């Protein structure tokens, strides 16, 4: 295949963070690029954090065993949840930063296991947000492998999210990188009929939870997953009441083995990282969206000053 355009000019120095895409085709190229990247790090006295799907981790362990300098992290709780990944990298990298050690990371999302178009879009958006999340943090270098032997439709969009690209063991500047906006979000799909609608304001949170419970019961969702959804929904609705004009509109429906709860209000969320960075112990607010990302399987946000905010909480149905 033809790789996206790139320049032979050395990549520009970035403040604290270097983000590199590695397109590869198949098992051998995956190992060639990632093992080489790890060896470069070890030769330079750097630590390495590997966050890839388990079958890829097994391949790498056979070549580079885990030791004090190479750590393989369990991604099962975050890999399919794009909103949790930045917080996870904060934790993984923070441990080494506290020791003052240079660190590299290898992070590959499970693209071959993507469950919906919305999830794929949020994973791509996460790749772009990484540049903002770590721009002013500790210096580290993240390599993002992407297998081009299967579906390659996302490759062009991913090059727009990565300032550097790796090919043949060399890192060069990616001229497709867009520091402003990696891609235009697709419009949210229409709610699936039949859906329920409820306008809420102060004093209506219990009624809102009851509306969600009624939809959940029809879909067979209960137990701790419903309790988690209630908590996330309460946080989002409370934000609507406090910051979105005093009221909002809830819609609920079932879609492709998921319960979807949509919240609309007149507010505007200006920070694209809202809810994705781990709150600090002294932080006064801003925990609502963080909790929603931790408790739901997917969170979609669309917000603009002239149209307000729409937030969709997705909870997968089991059984």
Image (cartoon, grey):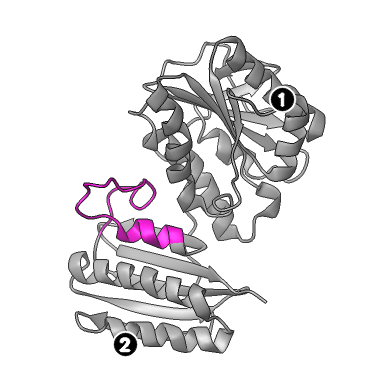
Question: Which residue is the site of mark 1?
Answer: 64
Q: Quadrant of residue 269?
A: bottom left
Whether residue 300 appears in this view of the structure is no
Q: Quadrant of residue 61?
A: top right
Q: Which of the pair 248/234 is nearer the observer?
A: 234
Measuring from the top left, give residue 240's x and y in whole percent: 25, 69
Q: Is residue 271 left or right of residue 255?
A: left
Q: Which of the pair 46/14 is nearer the observer?
A: 46
Dot 2 surroundings within 10 Å: few (below 14), some, or many (20 or more)? few
SS for dot 1: loop
- Kindly identify the residue that appears in the image at 71 percent across and 27 percent down: 65
- Kindly identify the residue that appears in the image at 36 percent across and 21 percent down: 15
Please, is residue 114 above or below residue 225 in the view? above
Kindly indicate whether the residue at mark 1 contacts the one at mark 2 (C-beta within 8 angstroms): no
Please, is residue 65 above or below residue 256 in the view? above
Q: Quadrant of the C terminus?
A: bottom right
Q: Which region shows up in magenta? A: 268-294
**CA–CA distance in space, label 2 to label 1:** 55 Å
Please, is residue 286 above or below residue 149 in the view? below
Question: Which residue is the site of mark 2?
Answer: 207
Is most of the magenta stretch helix, strand or loop? loop
Q: Is residue 310 left or right of residue 120?
A: left
The verdict on residue 286 being magenta is yes
Q: Is residue 71 left or right of residue 197?
A: right
Q: Which of the pair 203/197 is nearer the observer?
A: 203
Q: Earlier in the sequence, mark 2 or mark 1?
A: 1
Whether residue 59 appears in this view of the structure is yes
- Kindly identify the residue that appears in the image at 58 percent across and 16 percent down: 41
């Amino acid at each position: 295949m033809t790789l996206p355009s790139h320049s032979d000019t050395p990549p520009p120095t970035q403040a604290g963070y270097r983000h590199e895409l590695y397109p590869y085709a198949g098992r051998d190229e995956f190992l060639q690029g990632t093992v080489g990247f790890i060896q470069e790090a070890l030769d330079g006295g750097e630590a390495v954090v590997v966050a890839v799907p388990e079958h890829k981790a097994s391949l790498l362990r056979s070549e580079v065993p885990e030791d004090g300098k190479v750590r393989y992290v369990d991604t099962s709780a975050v890999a399919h949840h794009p909103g949790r990944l930045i917080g996870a990298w904060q934790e993984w990298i923070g441990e080494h930063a506290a020791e003052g050690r240079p660190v590299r990371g290898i992070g590959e999302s499970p693209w071959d296991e993507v469950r919906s178009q919305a999830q794929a879009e949020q994973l791509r958006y996460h790749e772009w947000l990484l540049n903002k999340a770590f721009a002013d943090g500790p210096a580290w270098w993240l390599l993002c492998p992407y297998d081009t032997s299967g579906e390659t439709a996302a490759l062009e969009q991913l090059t727009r999210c990565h300032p550097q690209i790796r090919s043949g063991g060399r890192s060069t500047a990616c001229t497709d990188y867009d520091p402003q906006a990696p891609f235009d979000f697709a419009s949210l799909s229409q709610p699936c009929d039949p859906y329920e609608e409820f306008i809420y304001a102060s004093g209506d949170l219990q009624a809102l939870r009851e509306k969600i419970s009624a939809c959940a019961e029809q879909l067979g969702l209960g137990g701790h997953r419903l309790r988690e959804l209630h908590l996330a929904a309460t946080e989002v609705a409370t934000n609507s009441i406090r910051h979105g004009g005093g009221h909002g509109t809830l819609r609920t429906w079932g879609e492709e083995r998921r319960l979807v709860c949509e919240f609309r209000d007149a507010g505007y969320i200006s920070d694209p990282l809202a809810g994705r960075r781990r709150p600090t112990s002294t932080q006064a607010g801003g925990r609502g969206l963080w909790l929603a990302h931790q408790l739901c399987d997917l969170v979609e946000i669309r917000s603009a000053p002239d149209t307000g905010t729409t937030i969709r909480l997705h909870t997968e149905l089991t059984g």
